[in-house]
Image: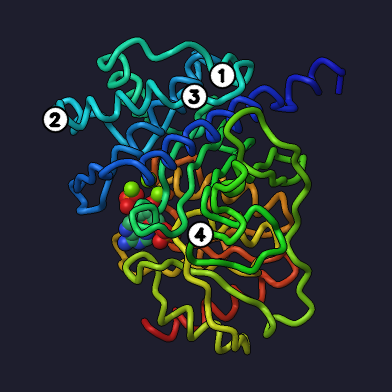
Amino acid sequence: MPLSAMAASSYDKELNVALLAVQRATLLTKSVFHNHAKGTLNKSDASPVTIGDFGAQALIIAALQHNFPDDEIVAEEEAKDLRENSHVRETVWNLVQRAKLSDSSAEQVLGGEVESADAMLDIIDKGDSKGGSKGRIWAIDPIDGTKGFLRGGQYAVCLALMVDGDVKVGVLGCPNLPVSDSQPLVEGIGADASDEEGKFGVLFSAVQGQGAESRALSKGSLTTSHAINMKPIKDISEATFCESVEAGHSSQGDAAAIASKLGITTPSVRMDSQAKYGSIARGAGDLYLRLPVRADYVEKIWDHAAGDLIVREAGGMVTDVEGNRLNFRLGRTLRENKGVIAAPREVHGRVIEVVKEVLGAKV
Ligand SMILES: Nc1ncnc2c1ncn2[C@@H]1O[C@H](COP(=O)(O)O)[C@@H](O)[C@H]1OP(=O)(O)O
Ligand SMILES: [Mg+2]
Ligand SMILES: [Mg+2]
Ligand SMILES: [Mg+2]
């Protein structure tokens, strides 16, 4: 490959912008958690959305538009509720104006300020791409695990770049996870993520073919990163697995039956959001089981794109419950996939066998 083509395919700029954009958005979500009524509204599917979700989405899209104006964006939220509710709109607008990285060169990378509250609404609505299998498309979940965010549990600010339907860059900001990869899995705020000395959780990232990394989140420029890898498993019965806190998002009964058939005796660690993908990618846990509760639920691309790449680049395999790779080419949803099974490559096949036995026995 000619040198110029290699440079063009390394995604250095995309990764740098994505990391800084996610870091700035996590700062906004932290300030909402500490200083505000959350401004929680209920969406049409009865799931919650807060001023933090809207503000984080506005900040991330503003940064992407400044740097990559021709790229499409698939984002979870829309501005309709803000257009109809001036009080919530003004609160989000204040947050967006105040959210700044302390390092001016980092801020400069992310681009100019959002001009007005109206411009902010239009920016939020730029996340309405239909997605698909052609071209450059970013997927944003401004707060994944909103219920965890509201409870003071885990949540993640999620951003991924897909090119022709393939995930090339993935970033997860997890403000409540421990900074250190070797801390045990936690459901609540990590002991070393308490915001003292400016430490507040971790940024995971991956670029296709270049491995996965983690680094401490900061309020200014990026901290130094290091490579992460899934933990090698000698005996699957010694694995730890994580699953959703919300029983409505993943069948905890099926997970317990699968774990028992695999000989796993350690209870599951329940945590919200794509923090589960980051946690197994750094070797703090081994398996992530997401087992369908309702036949009619269709997973969204923004809930999985970044985590899928980060786990695969750390040595894992991510599929649905049938063992098929997640298909990000079909639009805003993963309509061909049911559930998610993420595991180290060497044991993934065995886990899928047992998943099929347990789920097959139910029908
Ligand atoms: N019935 C469901 N099954 C699986 N996932 C769901 C379901 N309802 C909502 N979700 C999504 O699960 C994600 C959080 O999952 P976790 O349990 O891993 O924290 C959220 O993005 C949420 O979507 P939404 O943003 O629409 O609420
Ligand atoms: Mg989500
Ligand atoms: Mg969300
Ligand atoms: Mg949501």
Cα distance, mark 2 to mark 3?
A: 25 Å
Side of 203 where 274 appears, left or right? left
Side of 323 where 297 appears, left or right? left
Give me the disc on residue 118.
none
Q: Nearer the viewer, residue 133 or 193?
A: 193
User: Measured along the vertical axis of the image, is residue 127 above or below residue 252?
Assistant: above
Q: Which of marks 2 and 1 is nearer the N terminus?
A: 2
Q: Earlier in the sequence, mark 1 or mark 3?
A: 3
Q: Mark 3 points at which residue?
A: 100
Q: Quadrant of the C terminus?
A: bottom left
Q: Are marks 1 and 3 in contact (CB under 8 Å)?
A: yes
Give me the disc on residue 189.
4
Q: Dot 2 surroundings within 10 Å: few (below 14), some, or many (20 or more)?
A: few
Give the residue type that dot 4 points to.
Answer: Ile
User: Measured along the vertical axis of the image, is residue 357 above or below residue 197?
Assistant: below
- SS type, badge 2: loop
Cα distance, mark 2 to mark 4?
A: 32 Å
Q: Mark 1 points at which residue?
A: 107
Q: Dot 1 surroundings within 10 Å: few (below 14), some, or many (20 or more)?
A: some
Q: Earlier in the sequence, mark 4 or mark 1?
A: 1
Front tag of 2 and 4:
4
Q: Nearer the viewer, residue 63 or 320?
A: 63
**Which residue is at a point 55% across and 43% down the rendered structure image?**
173
Q: Which of 235 and 228 is in front in this view?
A: 228
Front tag of 2 and 1:
1
